[in-house]
């Protein structure tokens, strides 16, 4: 190998080596940015793809006509029984034939939405709350909350929430993401728990003050 060939070989070797070094150097920021973008998403349990077109998978089995009618019948039957009212009175007030009411309560007939709401209202229940609970959380949850203050609270909350969201968020209401719902629900529950604890502390403090005042008067 003459001097010219040796120089060419060395130059080619150095160029290839420099190219590999540059590629390795550029690989470092690439890995950094890949880590920077993917890790926070992984920690937040989110991904870019669902954020663009989020869809919830629904189990069609739980939406079957027979199961839905059975669960709704159980809810309405329990509401009527807890009301302590005569079924004829409920049928008359709900504007439904008494035989249709009977068949509805045993699951032989599917009531309309209006009929279900009127049966619940005639039974002294919070109609919208229990229908929303039935649709969103299932029949067992809706039945457990019959004749409770939490059901009445839920009804007022649901009725007030859409207007409150539009009033407070304004145009930002369209930026709300479905995946935030679960965290928001837990935060609201925590807020209520803190509020109840604060009320209990105030009641205890007022009780101590009253006891001290009455005791002082006796002295």
Image: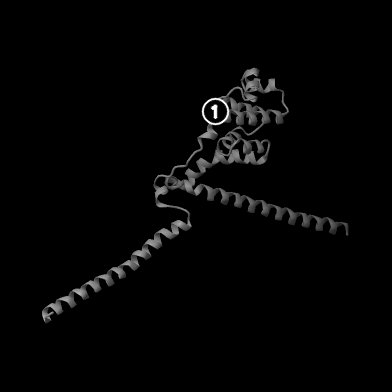
Nearest to the observer: residue 96 or residue 43: 43
Question: Number of numbered discs present?
Answer: 1
Residue positioned most to the bottom: 3
- Left or right, 61 with respect to 152, comes to left
Q: Residue at x 65, y 41 (%)?
A: 150
Point 34% across, 68% down: residue? 28
* Foreground residue among 100 and 204: 100
Relative to 122, residue 42 above or below = below
Q: Which residue is mark 1?
A: 65
Q: Is residue 102 above or below residue 206?
A: above
Residue reaching furthest to the right: 219
- Left or right, 31 with reference to 214: left
Find residue 179 and report its horizontal and vertical position in percent. Answer: 48, 48
Residue under the point 14% across and 76% down: 8
- Dividing the picture into quadrants, the one containing residue 90 is top right
Tag 1 secondary structure = helix
Quarter placement of the C terminus: bottom right
Left/right of residue 14 with respect to residue 201 in the rendered view? left
Crowd class of label 1 (few under 14; some 14 to 19; many from 20; radius 10 Å): few
Residue 92: x percent and y percent? 65, 20
Q: Nearer the viewer, residue 103 or 213?
A: 103
Residue 101 in the image: state x and y as whole percent: 64, 21
Q: What sort of colour scheme is used for the picture?
A: one colour
For the N terminus, the quadrant is: bottom left
Residue situated in front as seen by the camera: 122 or 69: 69
x, y percent for residue 50: 42, 48
Q: Which residue shows up at 51% across the image and 47% down it?
A: 181
On screen, residue 15 above or below 54 = below
């Amino acid at each position: 190998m003459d001097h010219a060939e040796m120089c060419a070989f060395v130059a080619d070797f150095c160029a290839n080596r420099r190219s590999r070094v540059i590629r390795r150097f550029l690989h470092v920021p690439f890995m950094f940015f890949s880590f920077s973008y993917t890790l926070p998403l992984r920690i937040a349990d989110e991904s870019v793809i669902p954020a663009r077109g989020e869809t919830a998978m629904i189990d069609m089995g739980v939406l079957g006509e027979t199961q839905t009618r059975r669960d709704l019948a159980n809810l309405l039957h329990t509401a009527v029984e807890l009301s302590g009212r005569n079924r004829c009175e409920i049928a008359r007030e709900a504007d439904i034939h008494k035989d249709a009411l009977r068949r509805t309560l045993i699951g032989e007939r599917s009531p309309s939405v209006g009929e279900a709401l009127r049966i619940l209202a005639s039974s002294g229940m919070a109609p919208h709350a229990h229908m929303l609970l039935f649709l969103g959380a299932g029949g067992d949850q809706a039945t457990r909350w019959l004749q409770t203050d939490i059901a009445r609270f839920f009804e007022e909350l649901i009725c007030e929430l859409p207007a409150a969201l539009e009033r407070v968020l304004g145009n930002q209401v369209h930026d709300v993401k479905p995946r935030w719902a679960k965290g928001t629900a837990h935060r609201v529950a925590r807020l209520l728990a803190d509020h109840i604890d604060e009320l209990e502390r105030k009641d205890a403090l007022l009780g101590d003050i009253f006891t001290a005042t009455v005791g002082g008067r006796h002295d």
